[in-house]
Image: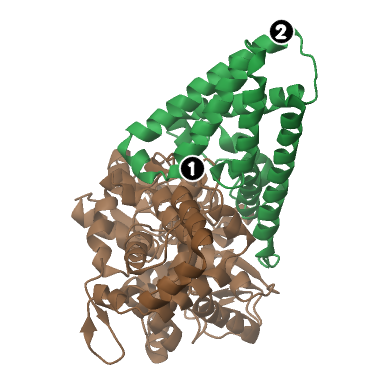
Amino acid sequence: MSKEVETKDGHIYPLEEKINRLKPEDFKKALQIFKEKINHEYAAYLNSCVHCGLCADSCHYFLTYGDIKSIPAYKLDLIVSVFKGAAPPTHNAAQSAEKSRKSGNVRFFRELYSKIVGAKDFNHQMVREWVDSLYGRCSMCGRCSINCSIGLNIAYLIRMARGVLTAIGLTPPGLKSTVDTAIEKGNNMGIPKEDWIETVEWLEEEFQEEVDDPEATFPIDKKGAALFYTVNPREPMFFPLSISAVGKIFYAAKESWTFSSGNYDVTNYGLYDGNDKGAGIMSNRLVQSMEELGCKTLVLAECGHGYNSNRWEAPEWLRKKYSFEVKSILEIVADYIREGRIKLEPSLNEKPITIHDPCNLVRLGGIVETQRYILKHAAKNVIEMIPNRQKNFCCGGGGGQLAMTHFSERRLKVGKIKADQIKETGAKIVATPCHNCIDQLMELNKHYKLGVEIKTICEIVANAIVV
Amino acid sequence: MLDFLRYGVILSLIISLISLAILIIKTFSFGRSPLNAKPQGDVKRGILYAFGRGMMPWEKESAGKHLLTYVAGILYHIGVFMSILYLFTLLFLIKLPVSFIYMFRITFLVGFLCGFALLLKRWLAPTMRALSCPDDFISNVIVDIFLVLAFLHTFFSHLLLLFFLFAIFLFLYIPIGKIRHCVFFFIVRILFGHFYGFRGIVPPQKKVTFEK
């Protein structure tokens, strides 16, 4: 549970205290938003859990902790119980007594029904459980959904419920500040425009030296380019080599492409705080850039949730059909290989490589075999983790867990499953097309002493490119 | 009395169906605008997968890991569907050949044993018990009793009154509790197939394999 929350008046309050200070109107607002967020899909899910419990050991939280609070069905039930019996708490005893006198029998049957089907009030205790379980015990990886006997999309219901908490100001602080920064400053790390441009120029110079070609460019705001390439802001800050790697691939493929000087952030933490409006603002920036630059394809960097957000969810948040293509950089690279636009020498990547499948890209995004096709051509020795693809385990870093520092102990603990998977392969390199996963894997690497390198797919491709 | 109960069963079934229809209408009244994202896969194939291969124990880890529960669940549901079918033959006075009676008997008995085993699991496994609400037990017990009555009726025809009476109770309970999943299961599987099929996640794509 969160330790602290900073409020507008500048005081530091424990999150617990913030929950305690919720007033009846806050609950009323939350329930109103809850109702507004329910569509027929969610309503069907909320009517259908049979509590078979078979989802339990599909969840890395349950496998780690073994407690009931970590069972996906339990987390779902927190939402279902409110859906079944939602009524804001009445603090006024006199009002409550009057109500009960008036509606005696109806009330009795309602209460009996509530007890039988497990309906519960949305009150302080329930909010506490929502925060702890829906934020602190779920990385929204969707592994439970594919293992659900019925087929409930639990991850999306949890997102919806997180959105309710966000609406009453109960987003865990780290996640909230990430979203706020992205909305206010245009990227989630608050990188000033000049710094971004300077970084790209510096990378361009380095690259020109590397390929000994002064004409090699990392274009910014190039109108009419075929591809508009986005990046995760962590790349210019901490992993500039992954930008260079993509630049090298585009150079080798003689691609017409561009960065945007302003809107380049592929990430969208609105996927994790459940606020569709905020998420829409972030994704719309990329749409605006696409329209301003007149590019044909929006190319999403190696970022799992960025792909899910911008490829699948953003058109729904924005309620519009895109007039352009949205593709993962992996799809572009795979096409280059197929079309012979780039030549790769697998022997340049000799160390054994294993693939980590980011949940948002693979299980929820549908980019499953593309990265494998690429690595088959770019590396000599690739070993699959077991299980893999749609059945792969989450690394623990998804669902905004990396931003919510107060849950980091749990995050590292649940990551042991992934660490063990990696160890089992004996690989020296873990390739993963997601910067969130990379951050988590780097921590796991250190914490569990795995002794591996963590790389993006494009870094491996760039290393194998014959220019 | 028997005719009165016979009509009672039919009436309770109609009430149950109307209530379920209202539930479904209410569910769909929440609405949802058509998807705007460009599809990557085939929705129809996704839905077919959801009702076929996607439920197989070799495809679904949770089913494979809990094979006994999975098989018990299937046999339990077969028993339930057969007992409803049997009820209809009694309601509409359809004479069954003896071999059919034997078949019904076996499915009722196996169905009951599986249902009861699942009930015991729910009661005895601490996580399952903690996960359950009274409805989980009530629904199971109601269906188990229905199966027992169906089974006993194949031997003792004078139990028909009791069987009909209990059928009325069962039908009236269906929309209230979790037995409503008898319709929601199909809706959710379609939604599942649609979601994952639309995104090209299921059916699984042709695998790229690596040399060992």
Residue A289 visible somewhere in the drawing: yes
Q: Secondary structure at mark 2?
A: helix
On the image, which quarter does residue A200 sit in? Answer: bottom left
Q: Which residue is mark 1?
A: A147
Determine whether B83 is above or below A417 in the image: above
Any mark on residue B99, and which?
2
Mark 1 packing: few (<14 Cα in 10 Å), some, or many (20+)? Answer: many
B132 sits left or right of A153 in the view: left
**Which chain is in brown here?**
A
| Image quadrant where one finds the N terminus of chain A | bottom left
**Which chain is in green here?**
B
Q: Position of residue A371 (x, y in %)?
A: 50, 52
Q: Position of residue A276 (x, y in %)?
A: 53, 74
Mark 2 packing: few (<14 Cα in 10 Å), some, or many (20+)? Answer: few
Query: In the image, what residue type sits under mark 2?
Result: Ser
Residue A345 visible somewhere in the drawing: no
Q: Residue at x 65, y 52 (%)?
A: B194
Are the residues flagged by discs 2 and 1 from a single subunit? Answer: no
A453 sits left or right of A368 in the view: left
Which of the colour schemes (rainbow, by chain, secondary structure, one colour) is used? by chain
Query: In the image, what residue type sits under mark 1?
Result: Asn
Q: Identify the chain of the residue marked 1, using the numbered disc in the image.
A: A
Q: Position of residue A94 (x, y in %)?
A: 38, 77
On the image, which quarter does residue A296 sit in? Answer: bottom right
Q: Secondary structure at mark 1?
A: helix
Q: Position of residue A31 (x, y in %)?
A: 49, 71
- Foreground: A78 or B61? A78
Q: Residue at x 36, y 69 (%)?
A: A241
Any mark on residue A401, and which?
none
B139 sits left or right of B131 in the view: right
